[in-house]
Amino acid sequence: MSLHSIRARRAGHQHPLILRLASGFRRFQRRWYHPEEPLFQSLKNGQNPLALVIACCDSRVDPVLLTDCRPGDLFVVRNVANLVPPYAPDGGRHGVSAALEYAVKHLGVQDVIIMGHACCGGIHALVSGGDGEEGDEFIGPWVDVARRALNKVNETMPDANAADKARACEMWNVRLSLDNLLTFPWVNEAVCEGRLTLHGWYFDLQSGELLEYDAEDRVFHPLVGRPHLGDRAAHPGTPRRS
Ligand SMILES: [Zn+2]
């Protein structure tokens, strides 16, 4: 079956998901392609994002949505468990490295943010055995990039329960991704020269807090604390972008 026939069949049946997404795209058009909204007039000529964000694929942790950013604000890489494999100039197909190279060398971003999160399925796979579910081919080898984070957890809290280990591993993994960024010589150079700043964030989707890694204290502090009840009253569940 060709891709064309798959698309045509779904369109013919007015697939509910596609209708919903198309409706959302119309709202996007009304918001950003309005004649009085000049943003896309500017973006048609190129992008100048504020930062590179490396986040997880998880549907609950969209960096643009979480930070209420506009189109063009963030250059985003998403992968299972927000990993940054270390520098490996071996001719392989390194998607994260390619995006990092483009953001740093060509877009000249001045900030790179690693955004980890609570309840990460990728980290859970690593903590629970590292090989993924039976029959999986790619998850185990991929999350093994974070093996050093798991080793740290097992060294520092060997008797902790699985949930506490997973949370700690999610945070160690943010630190590991920051360390791995520095294995790229042109990232290391830019950081040393003050042209680039690295940030480690952790979105605790259970408490609603956003934590920031403090490299001096080597702990995560709240960047944005728990949501206030008043905040919810002001935005009672209605998506702001709709
Ligand atoms: Zn995740």
Image (spheres, rainbow, N blue to C red):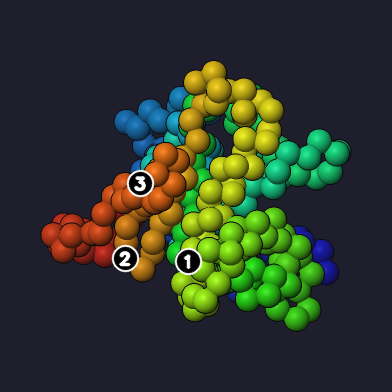
**What residue sits right under mark 1 in the picture?**
167
Q: Is residue 125 left or right of residue 197?
A: right
Q: Are marks 3 and 1 in contact (CB under 8 Å)?
A: no
Residue type (three-letter) at the residue carrying disc 2: Ser
Residue 69 in percent (x, y) is at 38, 42
Quarter of the C terminus within the rendering: bottom left
- Residue at image position (56%, 55%) is 173
Q: Are marks 2 and 1 in contact (CB under 8 Å)?
A: no
Residue at disc 2, secondary structure: loop
Residue at disc 1, secondary structure: helix
**What residue sits right under mark 2 in the picture?**
207
Residue type (three-letter) at the residue carrying disc 1: Arg
Mark 2–mark 3 distance (CA, rounded to whole Å): 19 Å
Residue 106 shows in the view: no
Which circle's residue, 2 or 1, is located before the other in the chain? Answer: 1
Residue 63 in percent (x, y) is at 45, 49
Residue 230 in percent (x, y) is at 13, 60
- Residue at image position (40%, 30%) is 39
- Residue at image position (36%, 37%) is 34
**What residue sits right under mark 3 in the picture?**
68
Mark 2–mark 1 distance (CA, rounded to whole Å): 13 Å
Q: In this view, does 30 lie to the left or right of 119?
A: left
